Amino acid sequence: MADPSSYRPRPGEIPDSPGVYRFRDEHRRVIYVGKAKSLRQRLANYFQDLAHLHPRTRTMVTTAASVEWTVVSTEVEALQLEYSWIKEYDPRFNVKYRDDKSYPYLAVTMNEEFPRVQVMRGQKKKGVRYFGPYGHAWAIRDTVDLLLRVFPVRTCSAGVFKNAARTGRPCLLGYIGKCSAPCVGRITPDDHWDLADEFCDFMAGRTGTYLRRLERQMAEAAEDMEYERAARLRDDIGALKKAMEKSAVVLADATDADLIAVAEDELEAAVQIFHVRGGRVRGQRGWVTDKVEEITTGALVEHALQQLYGEERGDAVPKEVLVPALPDPVEPVQQWLAERRGSGVSLRIPQRGDKKALMETVQRNAQQALVLHKTKRASDLTTRSRALEEIAEALDLDSAPLRIECYDISHLQGDDVVASMVVFEDGLARKSEYRRFQIKGFEGQDDVRSMHEVITRRFRRYLAEKEKTGEWADGEALTDDARHPNGDAAPDGDAAASDDGAARTGGRGLTDGQELTDGPAPKDDDGRPKRFAYPPQLVVVDGGQPQVAAAQRALDELGIDDIAVCGLAKRLEEVWLPREDDPVVLPRTSEGLYLLQRVRDEAHRFAITYQRAKRAKRFRAGPLDDVPGLGETRKQALIKHFGSVKKLRSATIDQICEVPGIGRKTAETVAVALARATPAAPAVNTATGEIMDDDDGAPETTADAPGEPVSAGTPDERRGQER
């Protein structure tokens, strides 16, 4: 590891002008290329105190052994030179987008005497016109098959073409009218070239001209009573319209634009591009990259523009490029695009209308691409094994943590405080082992205290299961701290089990029925589910030093010393260990860091889902919910019989007993519960402002009025307040 001060340029050496700089390692390999409006100001940022640098930048400058720069005249030249050097040197610390597939294009070889229509992949060639990219090659062939009725351009290979010319007999397409057969001289080279040019114009979006011309020719043929020709032209028009329907109109006619969207997390980013030509989506492609350097969304967009248009000229660069964030500064990038196109290019963020709506669609595609990439990465056995080994090495564990449990706390401004426990075994989520908890030990917002309570309850339950199965050594017993608060070992009905919903869902503690995907939970000899029988090798908490210390303190109090604890802080993805002042910073490309991040994100998702469900249930709660022994069926029967809670409250016990299924004891309990409940404020229709009476049939509530729950802030604001 090099000391940046050992190769820092002397004061005054670095010019205060635009340029491009390169960091090299001790083997003279280029590891990073960057550009700057002022080389002096930019490079000075790399040679400050290492503690003030982002971890990824710190890794880069300590890997480098020298820095050099090249001065240019303008920022546009710097942009061009940066792109050339990134392509030439392939630096390890630069953002490099990689295609998630090899995209096929519809290509027309206009550089040949007899242009050919074909599917092409790989590097683009000079003199060939490309359309796409397409998601699948068969989509290109379907489109070409429809268009060959109207534009019978050559599609055969060079060998087939030469053989037909030698024998004087065209191929099958020539006989059925889907090729003009230039191989046997049915059409001159110039006429065939013009036909291919018309095909390209149609594919480029200039469709109206050809449709109107064919419709006019069809009408003329019908007037001249050439009905067979008119019918053939009618079929040609139908084929063109069918080909056009394959790409839906998304923007105003004749709009040429590329829409770029970025989905990112702390480690990776996915880019999706929609190519719109003539108002229709003509192609789509996507890239995924590791975020090796500290980078903004605008910088990701700039790198995407470089890769997308670095080799393009003319019409391949559209008039309009819509992006989610603008590069900083935007003027050099816009000028660079204009030079490559040969005319002005608008680079902007869509604000309203169809373009903004389409951008949202592109953004959803980017999000899905990132999720799919992560899923493929997580499913690889070799990758998972390497991730577990890296975690064991970084945390100094004796063996790879085959079972990892992660805990997260969720609440809304201190209300409905809950916690989640997710389990990963062999690097994969085991959803049947998920658990959820209500925090009952105290009121209010205290993530550290909540974490201590959850860890205590979970592992007290583990100790109780361990004692029940006879795994204790002779003479060994639960410590006082490991006992239930009443002095006994935690029974099956302990709050730790009932709070998380395990007793109600067969020991699975699921937020909803969709969570169970990997079979039933393990069973005891008596057939009861083992809720907390298996200990993890590693406990991960969502948070930093305070949460880690609370989790470790809970384990210490229970006398458990064979389970490792760590925390993952979201801001810089630092791994915190108990009783350590400095975090462990895993390498940016570490599969171990990726696995820890995925575990933490899953715990957060599971916790916030449960918290929202509890909050929604609280908003819908009514006075009948507090009546012991009164189930949902009998509650509905009472409401149906009396019409509303208001009428039920005024009924006598004898009248309540008239409801089928309601005995006198239950009727007395209902009457007492309703008498104690405070009548709710009148419900208000939030759309009209109308005050709704209970007689409308809606059940009364003691919380907010039925319908839209009244709570602090808008839905977006409430989501922002959730933890």
Image (spheres, rainbow, N blue to C red):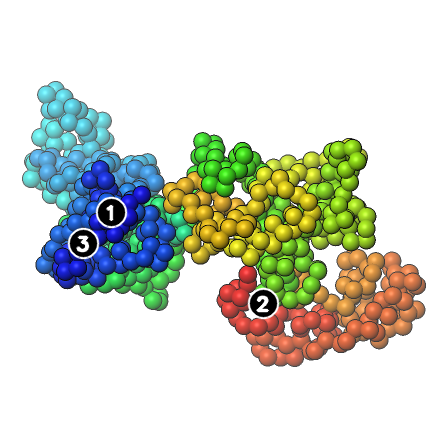
Residue at the front extreme of this rendering: 6
Amino acid found under the numbered disc labelled 3: Pro
Mark 3 → mark 2, Cα distance in angstroms: 51 Å
Tell me, for residue 137, which label it has, or none: none
Residue 76 position by quadrant: bottom left
Disc 3, SS:
loop
Q: Is residue 708 visible?
A: yes
Residues marked 3 and 2 touching at CB (< 8 Å): no
* Residue sitting nearer the eye, 701 or 652: 701
Q: Label 3 belongs to which residue?
A: 9
- Residue identified by numbered label 2: 413
- Residue located at (69% from left, 71% from top): 703
Compute the Cα span from label 3 to label 1.
Answer: 17 Å
**Which quadrant: the C terminus?**
bottom right
**At numbered mark 2, what does the secondary structure look like: helix, strand or loop?**
loop
Q: Nearer the viewer, mark 3 or mark 1?
A: 3
Q: Residue 316, relative to residue 712: is it above or below?
A: above
Question: To which residue does mark 1 refer?
Answer: 32
| Earlier sequence position, callout 1 versus callout 2 | 1
Residue at 8% across / 35% down in the picture?
113
Q: Position of residue 472 (x, y in %)?
A: 75, 35
Q: Is residue 310 visible?
A: no
Foreground residue, 467 or 542? Answer: 467
**In the rendered view of the protein, which quadrant contains the N terminus?**
top left
What type is the residue that disc 2 sits on?
Gln
Q: Nearer the viewer, mark 3 or mark 2?
A: 3
